[in-house]
Image: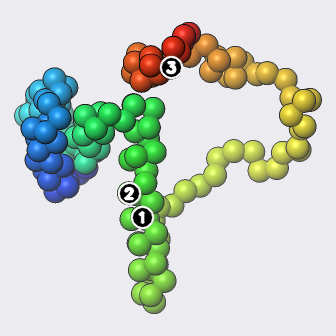
Amino acid sequence: VYKNYDPRAKIIRGLAEEVFSIVGRDPLIEIAVALEKAALADEYFVKRKLYPNVDFYSGLIYRALGFPPEFFTVLFAIPRAAGYLAHWRESLDDPDTKIVRPHQVYQGAWLREYVAVDARREGAEEADMANIPVSNATRRRLAPFNFAGK
């Protein structure tokens, strides 16, 4: 979400239309357009100057290109990593740079003792993660391999 309209979102929206003209129109684009239109007219979003970012439409493009949703996080991160590195490199050349983004503060435990893998016990979080069902998209993608998902 941007405080000003992300100019890349307009470009990506046009690119999404171009991709759909080649691979077929994804019904989710209609929902995305309707959501964007509703958000741009809604008092809550207008008052706070909230706008969709580039990922709003790029996810639909990734879906149309056949990427499973499980890959989206990585696909969103790859171009950002290049941008972060470019920003960092520019900051090295500028003696007036006082702020370097992204700024991250580690919130975890400062020091932990190593526990060998065979000595670790399964925690509640790990048990919950083991029960996550396989998505329908993954089932479809793996169907040719006779995958019997959970």
Q: Nearer the viewer, residue 142 or 34?
A: 142
Q: Which residue is mark 1?
A: 82
In three-dimensional space, the C-alpha distance between marks 1 and 2, rounded to whole angstroms, equals 5 Å
Residue 145, label in figure = 3
Q: Which residue is mark 2?
A: 79
In three-dimensional space, the C-alpha distance between marks 2 and 3, rounded to whole angstroms, equals 32 Å
Q: Provide residue 69's location: percent of width, then percent of height.
A: 39, 31
Give the residue at x 13% y 29%. Answer: 25
2 vs 3, front mark: 3
Residue 11, label in figure = none
Q: Provide residue 107's location: percent of width, then percent of height.
A: 64, 47
Q: Residues within 10 Å of mark 3 (few under 14, many from 20)?
A: few
Label total for image: 3
Please name the amino acid that badge 3 sits on: Phe
Q: Nearer the viewer, residue 110 or 144?
A: 144
In three-dimensional space, the C-alpha distance between marks 1 and 3, rounded to whole angstroms, equals 35 Å
Please name the amino acid that badge 2 sits on: Pro
Give the residue at x 86% y 29%. Answer: 120
Please name the amino acid that badge 1 sits on: Ala
